[in-house]
Image (tube, helix red, strand yellow):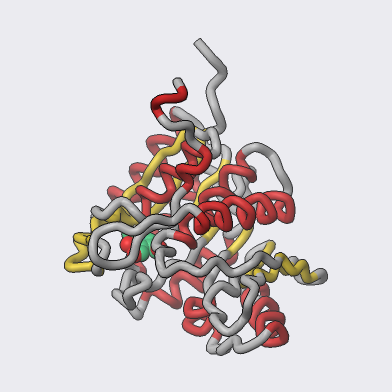
Amino acid sequence: MSTTPPRVLTIAGSDSGGGAGIQADLRTFFACGAHGMTAVTAVTVQNSLGVRGVSVLPADVVAAQIEAVAEDIGVQAAKTGMLATAEIIAAVAKACDKVHIGRDGEVPFVVDPVAASMHGDQLLRDDALDALRTELFPRATLVTPNLDEVRLLTGITVRDRAGAREAARALFALGPRWALVKGGHLHDDPECVDLLYDGSTFLELPAARVDTKHTHGGGDTMASSITTALARGMDVPAAVRFGKTFVTRSVQHAYPLGGGVGPVSPLWRVRPISDI
Ligand code: PXL
């Protein structure tokens, strides 16, 4: 017998191609030494070329998964990914309140406001954006939008580092304790600078841009590694620094897959079988 590792929960959609969504979250949790649990929201029919279909689960089934694992196994930190509909968002908010996940409960809660895939496939219905803003953001310990999601959520188009500050202020005004604006989509910037804001102090986190098109699941991997660090008791700036390093290394180890976009890979943390 050994010690039970930190238990972390992802509330997210399945990517049949194994690169993003709950599959990315689980492999990141594992690579960071945590026990991963899932509340599945939707099943995407997907490969490296894009999303062919989406089947959304009933909102009460999503809530029941959260409650089942929280009541028995316990959750040290949780994150959200693809939530698909306003009904699911409302059910997640209610279930999280019940089991004390989120801002006024004891359990750190990372809200990654996934809206679309890299191919532009919609993963969140239009009418769900408002639910994300009003029901989940005020419960979040940390929100982690990319620049496309920033534009959808705040109306601000970020073009430079000053714009990122304006966006961080607007996100913070929606109620999370911390907002992280991820600069990876500013393709003209030779660095990927993320900006963390707690309502008073800005923390810039730069990393060199990696020259690869294989970045599927990058946002999920970053949010999951941050969530695991929070479960281990790190504070938010330390957890975000860890997540930034973890995702940068995972992008450096991204690999081609199928005919399209390959995934970032946390496999750099795992020893090959021959090393046993
Ligand atoms: O990387 C965002 C994301 C999250 N969840 C699911 C996805 C994607 C991107 O494709 O398919 C299920």
Give coordinates of residue 139: x percent, y percent: 58, 59
Position in image of residue 239 (x %, y %): 67, 50
Q: In the displayed orientation, state which residue is furthest to the top.
A: 1
* Residue at the spot 48% in from the left edge and 76% down from the top edge: 149
Task: Say which of 139 and 216 sits in front.
Answer: 216
Residue 121 appears anywhere in the view: yes
Residue 90 appears in the rendering: no
Q: Residue at x 29, y 55 (%)?
A: 15
Quarter of the render that holds ligand 1 = bottom left
Determine whether, in the image, residue 233 is placed left or right of residue 185.
right
Tell me the quadrant of the picture where the C terminus can be found. top left
- Against 94, residue 107 (above or below) is above
Direction front: furthest residue: 274
User: At x 46% / y 67%, what residue is drawn?
Assistant: 212
Q: Is residue 253 left or right of residue 180?
A: left
Q: Which residue of the protein is positioned furthest toward the right in this rendering?
A: 200
Residue 213 pos. (x, y %): 41, 69
Q: Is residue 12 left or right of residue 197?
A: left
Q: Please count the marks in the image.
A: 0
On the image, which quarter does residue 144 sit in? bottom right
Q: Pick whichever, 252 or 145, lies toward us.
A: 252
Rendered location of residue 1, percent (x, y): 50, 10
Q: Residue at x 43, y 67 (%)?
A: 114
| Vertical placement of residue 103 versus 53, above or below | above
Q: Would you place residue 155 above or below residue 261 in this image?
A: below
